[in-house]
Image (cartoon, rainbow, N blue to C red):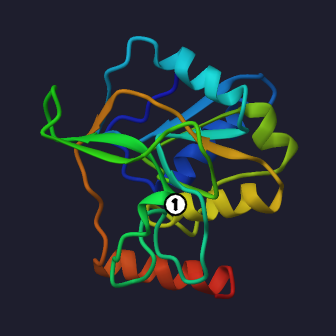
């Protein structure tokens, strides 16, 4: 287990550091936000079970990807939620257990095109074999969207898993940093 307490670097940089350090050691990567409480005693088994069916797993995602889509959950930059039939996963919200709120996006164990970066998991062999890394131009916003696009291009299936967790943050959509990241994302993927 590798933790980065009080990290000030972008998530892409930190996650790539972990990939580089363990590139010769087969392992399971679980990339997770520092404001995430994993409450499931069998979390490692849940992730391993999901990885028997998908190359990359997460807790929430979208079955489709559209041009100009600014997040796994939203259809456009006006933050309109995608249709419920396209969403998958469950995430608790708050700072306590039980969670203050529970977002039930849709049934888990669905193949998706985009995953929420609050938790992403994959075996090292999957990432290395397919040359999937985190693009360090995306320090926080859009690193997950870009990561999923790379997986899609390399035909690596992604899916959601049921995992009991609570996330403190709801995201910082619409901030200047988010808008800057969105422009970089659109430029990279020519949308």
- Asked if residue 191 can be seen in this view, the reply is yes
Residue sitting at x 77%, y 22%: 25
Decide if residue 147 is on the left or right side of residue 23: left
Q: Is residue 43 left or right of residue 154?
A: left
Q: Which residue is mark 1?
A: 86
Residue 135 at least partly seen? no
Q: Image quadrant for the C terminus?
A: bottom right
Vertical order, 160 against 145 (above or below): above
> Which residue ends up furthest to the front in the rendered image?
85
Residue visible at 75% across and 51% down?
Answer: 132
Instruction: State the residue at coordinates (42%, 60%).
Output: 84
Give the camera-side residue of 124 and 40. 40
Secondary structure under the numbered disc 1 in the rendered image: helix
Q: Is residue 82 above or below residue 7?
A: below
Residue 29 rendering spot, x and y as whole percentages: 61, 31
Please indicate whether residue 188 sits to the left or right of residue 75 in the image.
right
């Amino acid at each position: 287990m590798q933790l980065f307490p009080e990290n000030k670097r972008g998530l892409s940089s930190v996650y790539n550091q972990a990939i580089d350090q363990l590139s010769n050691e087969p392992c399971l990567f679980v990339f997770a936000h520092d404001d995430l409480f994993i409450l499931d005693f069998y979390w490692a088994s849940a992730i391993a079970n999901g990885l028997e069916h998908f190359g990359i797993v997460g807790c929430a995602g979208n079955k489709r990807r559209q041009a100009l889509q600014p997040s796994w959950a939203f259809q456009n930059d006006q933050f309109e939620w995608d249709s419920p039939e396209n969403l998958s996963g469950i995430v608790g919200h708050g700072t306590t257990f039980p969670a203050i709120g529970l977002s039930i996006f849709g049934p888990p164990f669905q193949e998706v095109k985009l995953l929420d970066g609050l938790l992403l998991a994959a075996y090292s062999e999957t990432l290395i074999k397919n040359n999937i890394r985190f693009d360090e131009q995306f320090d926080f916003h859009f690193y997950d969207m870009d990561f999923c696009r790379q997986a899609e291009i390399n035909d690596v299936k992604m899916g959601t898993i049921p995992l009991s967790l609570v996330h403190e943050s709801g995201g910082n959509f619409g901030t200047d940093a988010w808008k800057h990241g969105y422009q970089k994302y659109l430029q990279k993927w020519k949308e």
